[in-house]
Amino acid sequence: MSELEDLYQEIILDHYRSPRNRAPGLAGEDAHVHHSNPLCGDEMDLRVRIRDGVLDGLAFDGEGCSISQASASAMSVAVLGRPVDDVLELVEQFRLMMHGEAPDRADDLGDGMVFEGVARFPVRVKCALLGWMALRDAVDTFRRGEEANDVTHEGDHE
Amino acid sequence: MTFDVATLRKEFPTLQREVGGRRLVYLDSAATSQTPEVVLAAMERYYRYSRSNVHRGVYRLAEEATDAYEGARTAIARLVGADPRGVVFTKNATEACNLIAYGWVRRQLGPGDALLCTVMEHHANMVPFQHAAQDRGFEMRYVPVTEDGQLDLDAAAQLVADGRVRFAAFTHVSNMLGTINDVPRIAALVRAANPDAIVHVDGTQAVPHLPVDLAALGADSYALTGHKMFGPTGIGALVADPALLERMEPFLTGGDMIRDVTLAGATWNDVPHRFEAGTPPIAEAAGLAAAVTFLEELGTERVRAHEVALGETFLAALRATDGVEVHGPHDMAQRGGAISFSLEGVHPHDVGAVLDDRGVCVRVGHHCCKPLMREMGVNATVRASLHVYNDEDDLEPLLEGLSAARRMFAGSGRA
């Protein structure tokens, strides 16, 4: 595989072209976070519904490159229906994977695993992480008893 | 074509490189230009032969170093039609804009005053003045941009009408839209409302690409940078009327910028040395002087003619490409060779990655002009920018890459 094909595997392109759980709203949402990376212009809105400690609903929306959008789509499939503690553990697994560590729970990360190669493209790591960091923040926001949060990520100068 | 581009390219070592087995296609000169051998040689000559500090030593090497450094001042003055006493060396154009912001604006403007800026500015020619406005309590006014990427001069006339604008800062050529602004007309408009207003122009994207004559432009102060005009990084200049510099306080203080120092205080050196504290970028100045000579030998009129011809070819081809939307003026008579565009259904980062795989270097992102991007309703664009070493053979790799990107990301149904 060329470097480019490695970055843009077919599963990633599929999530980009046909995103799962991408919607401008979520019925019965408990928390809504907006994350942006001003340096690449990526924007993400992520909404969660949490029932009895379980991530019961998730919708993301936004504008960004294929890596950020596909990663959020793959994430949504991997985390929906899981207890929120488990969700946070998967977020950490994905984060460490972006820093070059092989995850223990590869099966649970599902399509998230295809982003493993992104770790070799440092400027794209923040793209792949955008949705996951927004999800972690949405859970934290909910746990603080708040309904919304706005976070600006510092990116590398482009 | 006005140049033998193939021969010219041989003078640029980087352009001999291959990336991923393909010829490097460098279309990012608006970010930084490539360096010709003569510039590298001038810098090396200083380090290998004349290395010493400037303005201090009485020995041969120090005289040579001083000549190299001061020679760069003369060269810049000659290039833009200025008095060498008005050329202050800085780290880059950003520092040049900060120098006028700290040396003049912050000391002159206060509550009740206004500063005219524009929506199309690079952050370098906006943020130093915004920052000053926050601290000093004067008002920032912004000239809007029309649909076709021009400054709205009717609106500008309204913005200065009350005579409270004491300083105007605007760009000569937009780094994002490519627009060439009518500097003399804007300067006249500002001065018609307030004859004492200072006109500061960001010439970063102009000096490397077209003839610049400060007197004809009517600018009191003009920022430029070396690294976009074949010179090294780490050196730029604020070129100003020496009389304006005389009225300015220093921004950085320390060695070399003083006339005398006592325990009670210091008095300042003459302009422009008053604004050049500490050991300056000497090798960079030597390189910059060589870059000016390189540009003069090419001839700024011919550089401009080359870019107009090549720009027309690129603009026509891009506009004819499915899914491409070109931003900024369509007529090369009104613009430079920095061409920003969007590709339908593909994010600029992804376009950049696909092009990189083909050895094509473009800039993607917000180009350090976020207010303008917001105004245009885009988060990011792709920018291909031209210089003297680009030719029609750089077009096909770009178009092929755009077509590959569209094939790859097609079907997303998103813009």
Image: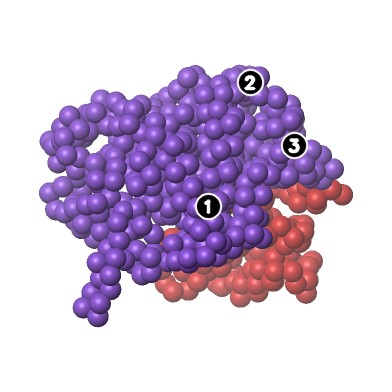
Chain colours: A red, B purple
Question: Which residue, given by chain and number where applicable, does mark 1 sit on?
Answer: B68
Question: Which residue, given by chain and number where applicable, does mark 2 sit on?
Answer: B2
> CA separation, marks 1 and 3?
26 Å
Of marks 1 and 3, the one in the foreground: 1
State the residue lying farthest toward the front.
B59
In the shown orientation, is residue B358 left or right of residue A48? right
Q: Position of residue B274 (x, y in %)?
A: 32, 59
Name the secondary structure under disc 3.
loop
> CA separation, marks 2 and 3?
17 Å
Q: Is residue B390 visible?
A: yes
Name the secondary structure under disc 1.
helix
Residue at the spot 54% in from the left edge and 33% down from the top edge: B296
Question: Which residue, given by chain and number where applicable, does mark 3 sit on?
Answer: B10
- Looking at the image, residue B212 lies above or below residue A109: above
Q: Position of residue B4 (x, y in %)?
A: 70, 25
User: Relative to the observer, which residue lies in front, B22 or B202?
Assistant: B202
Q: Chain of mark 2?
A: B
Q: Identify the mark nearer the N-term, 1 or 3.
A: 3
